[in-house]
Amino acid sequence: MSSLPHALEIDPESSLQFTITRDPATDGSDGSSRCTMTLRHPGHTKGYLAFKVKTTQPRRYLVRPNQGIVAPNSSETVSILLVDKDRQVLYSTYERLGQSALDHSKDKFLVQSCAVSDDFSAKFQNEPRMGGEGGQYKKELVEELTAMWNKASSDSNLPVYNKKLHVRHVVDTGANAAAVKGRWNQWSCEF
């Protein structure tokens, strides 16, 4: 936890966990492996904070929203979805090699935050977002945020807070145990 005026509090603090099931279509879920992250403005300053979420595997994860603005003493929930094709590959790896093969994931996320001017944040206040809370800003605002982050990365005078989070992939053993039990029953019936 940081007391820097441009730092967001991030929950979870150090790692993101994705639970992988064998067949998500039949396990009662919506068919996806996802997690959420909460970014909270601790109120150390009266100004708004901008955030950007990056990953080492941008084709493996869908992050919504991946950038935005957070008002003092409020929070933003970021939803991260593991793409189904990669979920299947990870589950196949688990079946061949076990959980230990998934325990060494090199996937990471980087959450960046910085203070923004009152003029900049005013553009985002009271602005409806597509899909409601947590949805995407309109195109012009997304472009302004992207331009602001491009400028921030080249401006060494603008303090940017960086927080790395590791990724954990865990197979749902409850679903796995049911699948094993089903196979055991099938085998025992054949003898």
Image (cartoon, helix red, strand yellow):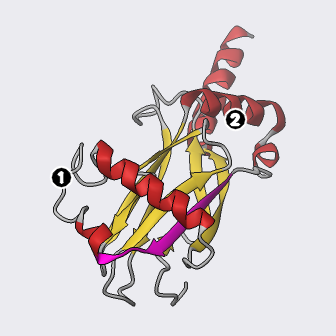
- Secondary structure beneath dot 2 equals helix
Q: Position of residue 56 (x, y in %)?
A: 68, 49
Q: Identify the residue position indicated by label 1 in the image.
A: 128
Q: Nearer the viewer, residue 109 or 142?
A: 142
Q: Nearer the viewer, residue 31 or 116?
A: 116
Q: Earlier in the sequence, mark 2 or mark 1?
A: 2
Span colored in magenta: 108-118
> Looking at the image, can residue 135 be seen?
no
Q: Position of residue 17 (x, y in %)?
A: 59, 55
* Quarter of the image where the N terminus is located: bottom right
CB within 8 Å, label 2 to label 1: no
Magenta stretch, overall SS = strand
Q: Position of residue 188 (x, y in %)?
A: 70, 18
Q: Residue 90 shows which numbered tag?
A: 2
Residue 63 is left or right of residue 121, and the answer is: right
Asked if the magenta segment contains residue 44, the reply would be no
Q: Nearer the viewer, residue 141 or 4?
A: 141
